[in-house]
Image (tube, rainbow, N blue to C red):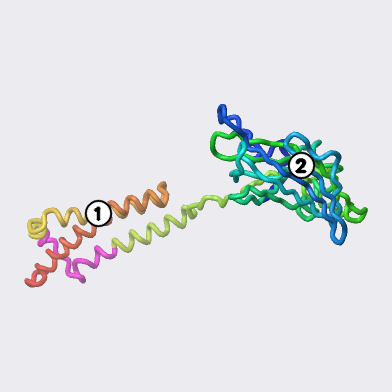
Amino acid sequence: MRSTMSSGMSFWTFFVLAFSSFVGAASGAWTFEDAQAVVAAKGGKADTYKFSPTQPVKGALTLGPKDILKISLTVKEDSKVGRPHQAFLLVQEPESKVETFFPLSVKELSGKAKVDLSHKDLPAFLLTAPSLSLSLVLGSFGESPASIVTIGGVEPSLDPTSKALLEKQKQKDIGEGTTVYKAKDEIRYVFRADPQSPPKIITLAFLLSVLAGLGGLFVVWFPILGGNLSHLPKALKAAPISHPLFFASLLSLEGIFFMYYTQWNLFRTLAGMAVVGPVALFSGSRALREVRARREKGER
């Protein structure tokens, strides 16, 4: 994992420093020995530079487009070789504090560690910087405090064409010369208007047609459909709760529809239907069962 940050300290650097300050007095510290930096050119000779925790590489190392910087060392916890939980090479641009890191490959038994660095590993912003500082970060769980040691510096070497391309890439990555953060245009949401009731004249016309239909039904009920109110006392006696409750539930359903048309929204209407609907179903089945029993006896 590699990441570039514009802050002065990466997350992992902060983690190591915080861990180091958290641990109290300790018997030793994470350090290293037998360290060297080798700048190997493809098809050319290799230059070797020695360094230690107290003496970094003198002068800046030049890293060309085809060069590879190979760093090797032995990690130690106090006086014994060890393998820390965190071990990486920190590459930082001193002026802007932009940095990235490269984990070291550490062998558990011998503590031998190494890391390679080339142009393709560095982001455009760091690759076009005049100079970069190199630091080793070592830290782990336990009593030994972590350590951050500056081991030297490196100067990336670029030809004019590569440098021009990288400058364009750097400006694209960090938005140099442009405003990175700015206010966006106001977003206006247009919601659909609430549904409107039809004109009153249409509503009245449908209401009159419904009332006329009900009136016509009552007119033809007795002479044509065989309506008989004489059985009402017998029906109420056989089912004194079901018939009135069924009739009241039918009126309630009509009232719910009326309230939905005038005031209620769909959710209140569904809630009312959930209450009245089961009552109408249960009472209606009882009432119609009583009517069926009378008709089976020939009573109409």
Q: Nearer the viewer, residue 49 or 91?
A: 49
Q: Which residue is mark 2?
A: 134
Inspect the magenta stretch and tell me whether residue 227 lies in it: yes
Q: Which mark is residue 78?
A: none
Placement of 222 over or under 16, stated as above or below: below
| Amino acid type of the residue tagged 1 in the rendering | Ser
Front residue of 33/123: it is 33
- Could you tell me which residue is drawn at 63 percent across and 41 percent down? 76
Q: Secondary structure at mark 2?
A: strand
What's the amino acid at mark 2?
Leu
Q: Which numbered disc, 2 or 1, marks the residue closer to the eye?
A: 2
Q: Residue drawn at (13%, 68%), measured in percent from left and top?
A: 292
Q: Is residue 296 above or below residue 177?
A: below
Residue 84 seen: yes
Calculate the distance from the C-alpha at mark 2 to the C-alpha at mark 1.
85 Å
The quadrant in which the C terminus is found is: bottom left
Horizontal and vertical percent position of residue 37: 78, 47
Q: Which residues are magenta?
A: 216-232
